[in-house]
Each structure stands twice: as C-alpha cells, then as structure tokens.
Image (tube, helix red, strand yellow):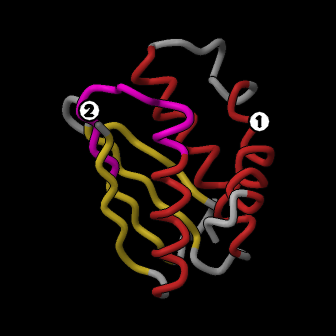
Amino acid sequence: MICFKVQGGRRHQRDSVAAAADWFAGMMMPGSHKVIVEIRIQNLVDSWGWVSEGDGSLYFLALEQRQTLRAMLQTLMHELIHVRQHEDERWSGDGEFEAMSAEVLADAVWLAGLV
C-alpha cells in the first residue's frame, strides 16, 4: 500500500499529481508494502524536482510548481521511479537510465484521462 500526501501548489496541480501518483502506484508498484510519499509542490531553486529517503519507507518528494502540468507529471513519474528503485533495491549506476521512461508514463496518465 502506498500513501501519498500532496501539499502546496494550486488545487488543480495537487489533484493532478495525486491522481497520477495513485495511477503509478497501481501500475508500477502493485502489492507494495506500506510506503509513504510526502509530495510538496513549491518553488525550487535549482531543479524541476527531487526525492529523498526518510526513515524506513518514507520519502520526501518536491516538484517545481512553475513548470507546465505535463512537465510536472513527467518530473513526478521520474522521481517515483526512483522511489520504486529504492524499494526494489534495483538500479544500475545512479538510476537515471531507468528513470528515463518518465515521459511515456506521464503520457499514459494523460491518455487514461486522469488529468
């Protein structure tokens, strides 16, 4: 079970990010043990987004609120792939190669009519 807490940004951003994150959890991490991802939509200084690991299966994820919604969803998917990598303990190098499928995943969210 994955629990997402989304804060900050505008309401449509929060709703879209929550829907996309739930979709990701169902498609990419079904049957996962308890994972909590706290997502904050805010102004970032030097990146479009990042994720860091807290205690246990707690993650803190930040998204730049000034990017387009499509770009924000791509960034979200990219960072959620890193969460999955940490939970599965599977990646090579810095894990960036595996996270490059974020654009395809964000498009799938659009095609599913979730945003």
Residue under the image location 65 percent in, 55 percent down? 75
The mark that comes first in sequence, 1 or 2, is 2
The secondary structure type at the circle numbered 1 is helix
Q: Against 93, is 49 above or below?
A: below
Q: Against 32, is 20 above or below?
A: below
Q: Quadrant of the N terminus?
A: top left
The secondary structure type at the circle numbered 2 is loop
Q: Is residue 84 left or right of residue 95?
A: left
Residue under the image location 27 percent in, 44 percent down? 36
Q: Position of residue 22 (x, y in %)?
A: 46, 52
Q: Is residue 90 left or right of residue 39?
A: right
Q: Is residue 32 left or right of residue 69?
A: left
Could you give the CA–CA distance between mark 1 and mark 2, rounded to whole angstroms? Answer: 23 Å
Residue under the image location 47 percent in, 75 percent down? 15
Q: Nearer the viewer, residue 58 or 31?
A: 31
Q: Position of residue 112 (x, y in %)?
A: 69, 57
Q: Which residues are magenta?
A: 24-37
Disc 1: CA contacts within 10 A as few (<14), some (14-19) or many (>=20): some
Residue under the image location 53 percent in, 84 percent down? 12
Which residue carries the number 1 mark? Answer: 100
Q: Position of residue 69 (x, y in %)?
A: 69, 74
Residue type at mark 1: give it.
Met
Q: Against 74, is 79 above or below?
A: above
Disc 2: CA contacts within 10 A as few (<14), some (14-19) or many (>=20): some
Which residue carries the number 2 mark? Answer: 57
Q: Position of residue 113 (x, y in %)?
A: 68, 66
Q: Is residue 101 left or right of residue 42?
A: right
